[in-house]
Amino acid sequence: MPHGSLDLLSAYTELAQSSPDVRLVVAGGETLFDYRDYRAAWDKLALELDVSPLVLGPVAHDELPSLVAAADVFCFPSVKEGFGLAAMEALAAGVPAVTRDLPVLREVFRDAARFAADPAEFADQMLAALRSPDSHRSAGRALAGQYTWDAAAAAHARLYATFD
């Protein structure tokens, strides 16, 4: 069974073998570290794999855009997702995204992101994105540009009009 951030940690280990200068930076923490057992599993796996990712913890909202924009690749290994807002924000910033291969994420991101199902695929797709960062950049920005608050409000208004 896939395990989100644990898969990312394993993928990072694989990626670092071919790209030793790569650094895994984890920002946030509300979903990664809300659960003590999951945090213990994360720490145990990092120790077993002998890796030390940079875990920033919660980041101020106004600091997130520059942090995301500074990334070379944004990895989104979520196993339970309804849209993928964080990955969409990365695409809007021009950062290549690798997301979990879930039907909903394929539907949302189509050809604008790379997809992976397990740690080996995440490592491969992150490496591909690092080697060819422009391959999905224009598709990502175009897709992200379609998701505006005005477009969301108009879609809601159309939906609500059907209830009259």
Image (tube, helix red, strand yellow):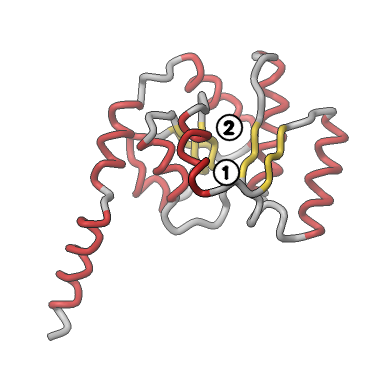
115 or 89, nearer to the observer: 89
Secondary structure beneath label 1 = loop
Secondary structure beneath label 2 = helix
Task: Kindly identify the amino acid type of the residue bearing the numbered disc 1.
Answer: Pro
Q: Tell me if residue 12 comes above or below residue 16 in the rendering.
A: below
Task: Kindly identify the amino acid type of the residue bearing the numbered disc 2.
Answer: Phe
Please state, as top left, top right, bottom left or bottom right, where the C terminus lies in the image: bottom left
Residue at x-position 55% and y-position 57%: 80
Question: Which residue is denoted by mark 2 in the rendering?
Answer: 122
Where residue 137 appears, x then y in whole percent? 34, 26
Mark 2 or mark 1, earlier in chain:
1
Q: Tell me if residue 39 comes above or below residue 111 in the rendering.
A: below
Crowding at mark 1 (Cα within 10 Å: few <14, some 14-19, many 20+): many
52 or 98, nearer to the observer: 52
Where residue 157 appears, x then y in whole percent? 17, 70
Real-space CA distance between mark 2 and mark 1, rounded to the nearest whole angstrom: 8 Å
Q: Are marks 2 and 1 in contact (CB under 8 Å)?
A: yes
Q: Quadrant of residue 161?
A: bottom left
Question: Which residue is denoted by mark 1 in the rendering?
Answer: 77
Where residue 20 appears, x then y in whole percent? 70, 14
In the image, farthest residue toward the bottom = 164
Where residue 156 appears, x then y in whole percent? 22, 68
